Amino acid sequence: GQQVMQIPQYQHVQEGEDFTTYCNSSTTLSNIQWYKQRPGGHPVFLIQLVKSGEVKKQKRLTFQFGEAKKNSSLHITATQTTDVGTYFCAGPRAGAQKLVFGQGTRLTINP
Amino acid sequence: SAVISQKPSRDICQRGTSLTIQCQVDSQVTMMFWYRQQPGQSLTLIATANQGSEATYESGFVIDKFPISRPNLTFSTLTVSNMSPEDSSIYLCSVEDNVYEQYFGPGTRLTVT
């Protein structure tokens, strides 16, 4: 079945370092979304990418959608302790209005 | 974006009992989703609940175990029936605001002893 894979599973950085998580789909996606889940919290929608090669920025966060619309990345510049959490990518399941979530990348930061 | 509340926020239940989780949205929405999230894991979709029709369950989830109600466009319930320790998890409801954009409730943390 359709799979959405994320790497790495865990990432520990020093505060101020950059962080990147990668998302790969087994199928071409019409769009991809990113969510952030703080420890003890619920997933919060960050952004949706729709166009091939699209790049969007939210302050220190940069989101990219691959040219083939099968992969995506989230890059955080100069991490802060508020960036701690698990970042999930999600893509729509083929033929259904449902999402398939990646396994998530858990980011921890040493202040 | 929609504001979603869930009740209870957490519960500790005995094996063999049932728990009903409520999800309330501050606006009318067509599609509501119920997810399960094991500690440290990703989100697994249990079922999709549309008002006026039967819930659609994902592979591995059945109506007898997880009955769902969707009486109107702002409310849904998920019941976890005949619970076992393996049902210990966080249960999340979500709604779709714009196409494919989902917004989640705060979750219900369930522990079965």
Image (cartoon, rainbow, N blue to C red):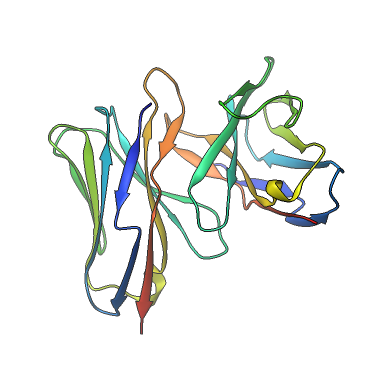
Q: Quadrant of the C terminus of chain B?
A: bottom right
- Residue at figure coordinates x 42%, y 32% from the top left: B100
Return the x and y of residue B83 as percentages of the image width and height.
79, 43
Q: Nearer the viewer, residue B104 or A19?
A: A19
Q: Please, is residue A9 above or below residue A100 in the view? A: below
**In this rendering, position of residue A69 left or right of residue B83:** left
**In this rendering, position of residue A28 left or right of residue A91:** left
Residue at the outermost top position: B53
- Residue at figure coordinates x 69%, y 51% from the top left: B88
Name the quadrant containing residue A1: top left
Query: From where the camera sits, is residue B34 visible?
Result: yes
Name the quadrant containing residue A29: top left
Name the quadrant containing residue B23: top right
Return the x and y of residue B11 as percentages of the image width and height.
79, 56
Q: Please, is residue B25 above or below residue A82 in the view? A: above
Q: Please, is residue A13 above or below residue B96 in the view? A: below
| Tag count | 0
Query: From where the camera sits, is residue B1 visible?
Result: no
Return the x and y of residue B67 as percentages of the image width and height.
75, 28
Residue at the outermost bottom position: A111
- Residue at figure coordinates x 35%, y 58% from the top left: A9
